[in-house]
Each structure stands twice: as C-alpha cells, then as structure tokens.
Amino acid sequence: MISYSYSAGLFGIDGFGVTVECHSTNKLSVFEIVGLPDNAVKEAKERVRAAAINSRLPFPDNEIIVNLAPADKRKEGSSYDVAILVSILLSNRVFNSPDKLKDACFVGELSLSGSIRPINGVLCMTVAARREGKKQIFVPYENAREASVIDGIEVYGVNSIVEIVDHFNGLRELSPISFDINDDISPVKYPDFSEVMGQSQARRAAEIAAAGGHNLLLIGPPGTGKSMIAKRIPSILPEMTFDESIETTKIHSVSGILPEGTSLIRQRPFRSPHHTMSAPSLVGGGKIPQPGEVSLANNGVLFLDELPEFNRQVTESLRQPLEDGKITITRAAGRITYPSSFMLVCAMNPCKCGYYGHPTHPCTCKKEEIKKYISKISGPLLDRIDIQIEVSSLNYSEMSSKQMAESSESIKERVNKARKIMQKRFVGEKTEAGAPITCNAQMEAKHIKKYCSLSNECSALMERAFTALGLSARGHDRILRLARTIADLAGSDDIMQSHIAEAIQLRSLDKKYFN
C-alpha cells in the first residue's frame, strides 16, 4: 500500500514542497528512507518508531520504504519527522478520513515520547506550503506564532503526534492560530541620542545616513564618542515595511536566532561582530551554507568597530554585498543566495596610537606606521562608504554643558518623514537584480539621472568637487545620492547648491586621511 503526506524543506531562505511517500508491504521488517536524505533525516527512522510506540499508536512490523520527493533535491534537518510518521500511520489506516490530510502540510521534529519539538525556518516552510496550494499547516506549538504571519493558510500549533491524530479523527479538534500584530514581546530599547554631548556634525551625519540608508565611517581619536553614536543609530532608523519585516524574519528564522515569543521582526537589526571574525562568519558559509553577519543585518545596520583591526580578507569580502545587496555562497551542497541589503557603519582611530591630528595629545606613531595603519582600508571599500566624517575631541564647555541634546524620537520623526518621501518616489522602481528600491542609497545610475537632476549652478559645483577631490564615477554618484537625501530631509523637491555642498563636505576626509 502507498500513502502520501506533505511537508516542506529549506534551501537557503526559500522553502520548497516535499511529498512524503510511504510504501508498506508484508515482508521482513525493514525501514528505509530515500530521496537524498542527510544523516539527520536518516536518523528519523528511530525517532519515528519510538514516538509511535510511546504514543500508543500502531507501527507496522513489516517492510517500510519512505521516499521524499522530489528525490533529486537534498533533504536536510529533522523537520520531516512528523510528515514521515503521518505517512506511515496513513498506510496503517490510523486516520478515519485520509482525504482530509490531502490539503495539510506537516513540519516538526519528533522526540522519542511523541512530543513535537520546534525547528528553524518555519516561516519559509509556511510560505512554501501556501505556494504548493495547501490549506493547512501543522507546526510545533512554539513555532505557531511565527508561521501565523502568512495569510492564506491555516496554522495549527501542535505539541504531540497524538494531537494530530485526534484532530483528524474528530476526537479533539484543534483551533487555528491567527496573527496578532500587537501580540509580540516588548521592542528592544536602544540608547538615546540625547545622551550624546556635542558632536553636532557627527549627529547630523548619522541622521542623513539613517534617512537614506547610506554607509557611514566615523574616524577620530579614542573617547570622542564614535561607538556611542554608532550604537544609537538603531534608535533613529525608519520603520520597517511589512515586506522588509518578512524578509528579515525569514533570515533570522533559518539561522535559529529569532527571539522567543516573536512572530515578526519589526525593528531593524543591529549587528556588531568582533574584529577577530572570519570571512565566512561575515558573508556566510559552512558545509551547508548558512547566513553570515551581512545577511543577519539585512534591512538594518552592520557596525564594524575598529575597522582597521579586521582582517583585510574580511573587509574586502564586503565589496560585493555592498554593491549588489545580496551574497551568493557556493559550496558542494549547492549555490545559495541570501539578501544582504544593509547599512554599513564603521568606526576607527586615525592611527595605531589613536592620536594623529589630535589638538593636544601628541601622536607617537611614525609616518610609515600611520600610512600602514590607514592602508588597511582599501580604496574600493572606502569608495563604497558614502559618508566619511571626523569625530573630533570635545572641549570642556561641551563636556560640562547641562543642556540636553535632541532626542532620538525627534530625529526619528524627520527620518521617517524623509523615508516616506523616498518610498513614494520609488514606487514600482527596481534594481537591475529585480529588488525593489526603498531608499536613496539603493539608486542605480538610471535612477540617479531620473531623480537627481541638477541646475547649472549645482552642476558647476559638482564639477569643481569632482576635480578637486579626484572622485571616481562611483564617488560622484554617491555624492548625488547624499544630496538627494539631504534635500528630502529638508522637504525640497529639487537639489540645491547647499545640499550639494553638505554632501561634498560629508566625503571630504579622502584627502586628509586616505591620500
């Protein structure tokens, strides 16, 4: 007898439908799983058998062959356990009305007692189940709220295999779980910009970067507040759209770092890896390619403190995701593309001792040492950082001032207003890779020509800056993107000379430090 149940698998952050076929015949007791299973799937044989016996469900003592179709796609992980057992129980006629299961999808890991444990990537699997035309999906109870975000499919959270059997046999029906946008845990509280003394120029740079999604480099002596400012940027980032939340939640779900009790990530992620990390940790990798920090920071901020201390190979691996907004990882297990559209924020000292250019503290580094330290950051990477701002030391009057600085809430209001202008402007616009454009930093050459037209006076100013700063074509375009963001913050439809001038000033450190 052949029976069928349905499950879903993962490939990167994309789910795919899996048909679980069970062939049971009256022969010697054999249990085999085929269809390119990995070791975790092969071990399901023992989990499934023990779960059925300990749940007092009949388990056939004959030949069982389970096929996971499509058989040419590798199956990984323990999420197929429930579907495999359901298929076996169907062949053993445990369910009164087998036809009811045709529109259902089952995912989850079985314990030996028959209880169902949570798994990673449930959100992606739910999307795949809906795409395959399934009307219901049964997931571990702990993952139910995460899966309920997806419309068009009923989500049931189950604690054990017995609950599934009783539900379909009409003994104890389960109720679907609906998504409640207000039912998540409290949002993360980030430090406030009101705690930052002085540094008006750096604060302004952070506001522009947050509004337009621009990359930012803060350079200056120790103790000037570079890291302090960077760690407060999440508090002024614009609100996420629903599509951005779904995409970010998918990545965190697959990685297994979705906070407990969270169904949908609504705050932009902030990732701050240590400088000793490896390139695969940053961009992703492993035998089975997993998302790296650039993908975990998708739609949010990747903060690299002490940038020159990072290995050169690590920082150079940022170039492609910064340009393309995605990262492709090729391994023996397959070729996976993860989204990596993030805002890069970096902080660094101007030299090894940290005091090059300081007005009162002498620098102890030799010229060769300063040059060697600065040269750890390549020109191509620096060219991809839109804003390069110097954070100078505070004087005593700034330190002792009792006047509170502007709060993050006030800054965020302006940022949200500017971002809404951008979203309205870019409706229907996409990059060459097909990704929707949501902020000025994502504009490509054709969009710059369309939305960053300049008057004759502005063009003359840009020409002088291009020659004086020795800008590349990329640097020229990035100044125009910055000017467009500054104009949006000012509520101006046109880019003015003052906007161009401020944008040029925000990239003026090339000559001082990186000549």
Image: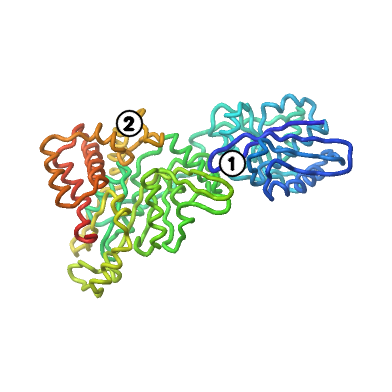
Q: On the picture, is 502 further left or further right than 209?
A: left
State the image quarter where residue 48 is shown: top right
- Colour pattern: rainbow
The residue nearer to you, when weighing 440 against 397, is: 440
Q: What residue is drawn where x is 27% and y is 46%?
A: 474
Q: What SS does tag 1 mark?
A: strand
Name the amino acid, label 2.
Answer: Phe
Residue with the mark numbered 2: 426
Mark 1 surroundings: few (<14), some (14-19) or many (≥20) residues within 10 A = many
Question: x%, y% of residue 402?
Answer: 23, 57
Residue with the mark numbered 1: 10
Name the amino acid, label 1.
Answer: Leu
Tell me if residue 243 comes above or below residue 233 in the rendering: above
The residue nearer to you, when weighing 185 against 95, is: 95
Quarter of the figure with the C terminus: bottom left
Name which of mark 1 and mark 2 comes first in the sequence.
Answer: 1
Q: What SS does tag 2 mark?
A: loop
Q: What residue is drawn where x is 72% and y is 47%?
A: 42
State the image quarter where residue 418 is shown: top left
